[in-house]
Amino acid sequence: MFAFLAEETGKAQEAVEQAPILVRLVNQYFGEYAYNFEMKYTYPFWKKLFARFGSTPEAAFGAYTPENAIPWYTIMFVMACILTLALIWIFKGKISEDDPSPGQQTLEVGVLAVRSMLEDIVGPHGLQFFPVVMTFAVLILISNLMGLFPLFMSPTSATSVTFALGISSFLYYNAIGIKENGLFGHLKHFAGPIWWIAPLIFPIELISNLIRPFSLGIRLFGNMFADEKVMDTVSHLAPGKTYWLVPVVLMPLSVFVAFIQTFVFILLSQLYLSEVSHPPHDSHAHDGQMDDEELQFVAPVLT
């Protein structure tokens, strides 16, 4: 047991030493407070839970010390939130309708692209979900790109972050489905339109729905983690020669992966929303004219 704990402590110490300086600084100043809090309130719970399976929290999570009390992915994700707000503020600059800056134009292109996707996939009424979907898009993109810069790591290369994002998307679209259709109506759509095969379709659709947060999380994590591993492996093929050159050459590919994975996540989230959210009326148009409720969602796109 002591040998196991010593080995785990050594691994934890090695991980701490390899962590970005920002992570070490945060744990240096706040790690002891987090460690004391978690050892008092959360560690007893995990200890009892893992004891039922003949294991320990150390075996599952590794050795726990004040130096790694606040995980690197938590710190990096908080930094991603801060960077997101800062970059949006910088890009928007002084908003001008007559002479927009390049940053403002970049933001407008992103906003219009996501709005267009929502309108095409969910419908004009789907623009009400724009704030949440756009938040996912910007936050995931910044998180994906952080690993390309010194002092940072991509929080989306950790399953804890990607699963949290997947579960957030899962809870959101199911909450929308229950809000619009009621609990019974939301569950009813899992049974399909044909009543006599509903007993077969319902459990299949229910299981498919329940694994969506994990598929979202695994897909995002797998691609971002693989991208970082490929960069690291190739850059160490010939130390001194490939360490700086190869990452620069492969950086456009990493940027492409970051954008693609952001696109895939929000695309799937919008597809899930389209399954549970429906227009407020049976018909979208009356004699070729949009009704007032549809117009209020389309108007911001047209202007």
Image (spheres, grey):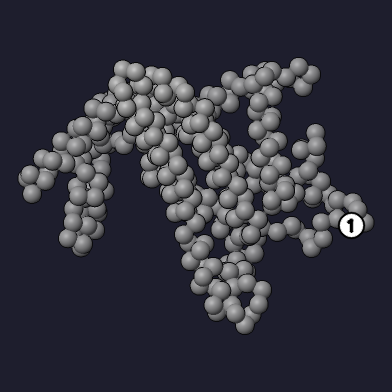
Identity of the residue drawn at 42% across and 29% down? 147
Query: Image quarter for residue 146?
Result: top left
Circle 1 residue: 286
**Residue positioned 89% across, 57% down in the render:** 286
Q: Please provide percent x and percent y for residue 262.
A: 54, 40
Q: Amino acid at mark 1?
A: His
Q: Does residue 277 lie above or below 205 as drawn?
A: above
Position of the C terminus by quadrant:
top right
| Secondary element type, mark 1 | loop
Residue 173 to residue 130: above or below: below
Viewer-side residue, 271 vs 127: 271
Q: Position of residue 195 (x, y in %)?
A: 64, 80
Residue at image point 29% right, 21% down: 239
* Viewer-nearest residue: 34 or 236: 236
Q: Is residue 151 above or below residue 57?
A: above
Instruction: Please tell me which residue is depicted at 59% across the width and 62% down the height of the picture.
Output: 178
